[in-house]
Image: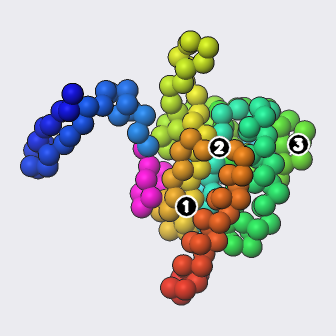
Amino acid sequence: MQIRSVSSTGRVRRGNRTAAARAAEPALRAGDRAPQFALPDADMEMFELADVLRSNHVVLYFYPRANTPGCTRQAADFTDREGDFAALGCVVVGVSPDDCLTLADFRDEHGLSVRLLSDEDSEICRRYGVWRKKEVDGFSKMAVLRSTFVIDRDGVVRHALYDVNPRGHAAEVLELVRAMDARNTHNGNR
């Protein structure tokens, strides 16, 4: 059944979505300010988004768990293209709810060079809208929705990609950054 309501500003709202469906909508969209944060990395050193954004674009990707096949593929693909991202003035950072020691083992075991951040309490995952309810074997649990955000030097989300497939994803994101860099060069904003 279609529901119509009028807000206090006079806008008509239509929809038949449940509260769960609304909760599953992306929290961030292109044009939004990226939530600032500081998280420890695999070496237990703090990473502050604001510090990196002063001179770089950032690809911030969220993944469910270290050492799973999809997460390993995604991290390895970003590692393989890290030089290409760096040439465009872009830093790649991965975030998961794993602890720092697990991330260090993951990095070392697979020869990863992208910086991996630990969000053990999932607070940053929530702020970016990637902490979602998931059905696994008939049970509901909270987990990270594999997602990527391309953030420009001004701290603005240029691309918000939710529920991505790890296969080929790093190459797709690299093309988005290239296009963004080309637009900035064309407009004289480098």
The outermost residue toward the front is 1
Precedes in sequence: disc 1 or disc 3 = 3
Report x, y in % for residue 37: 55, 48
Callout 1: SS: strand
Name the front one of labels 3 and 2: 2
Which residue shows up at 55% across the image and 86% down it? Answer: 186
Instruction: Identify the mark at residue 51; answer none if there is no mark.
Output: none
Which residue shows up at 32% across the image and 27% down it? Answer: 19
Which residue shows up at 48% across the image and 51% down it? Answer: 35
Precedes in sequence: disc 2 or disc 1 = 1
Quick check: can you spot residue 64? yes
Packing grade of label 1 (10 A; few <14, some 14-19, many >=20) is many
Question: Which residue position holds label 1?
Answer: 151
| Residue in the foreground of this view, choosing between 23 and 163 | 163
Report x, y in % for residue 173: 64, 59
Instruction: Identify the mark at residue 165; answer none if there is no mark.
Output: 2
User: Does the stretch in magenta take in 127?
Assistant: no
User: Does the stretch in magenta take in 31?
Assistant: yes
Question: Which residue position holds label 3?
Answer: 110
* Mark 2 → mark 1, Cα distance in angstroms: 20 Å
Which residue shows up at 55% across the image and 20% down it? Answer: 135
Which amino acid, mark 3?
His
Horizontal side, residue 126 vs residue 17: left or right: right
Q: Which residues are magenta?
A: 27-36
* Mark 1 → mark 3, Cα distance in angstroms: 26 Å
Give the quarter of the image for residue 141. Answer: top right
**CB under 8 Å between callouts 2 and 1?**
no
Question: For the stretch drawn in magenta, what is the main secondary structure?
Answer: loop
Total numbered badges shown on the rendered structure:
3
Q: Is residue 61 above or below residue 32?
A: above
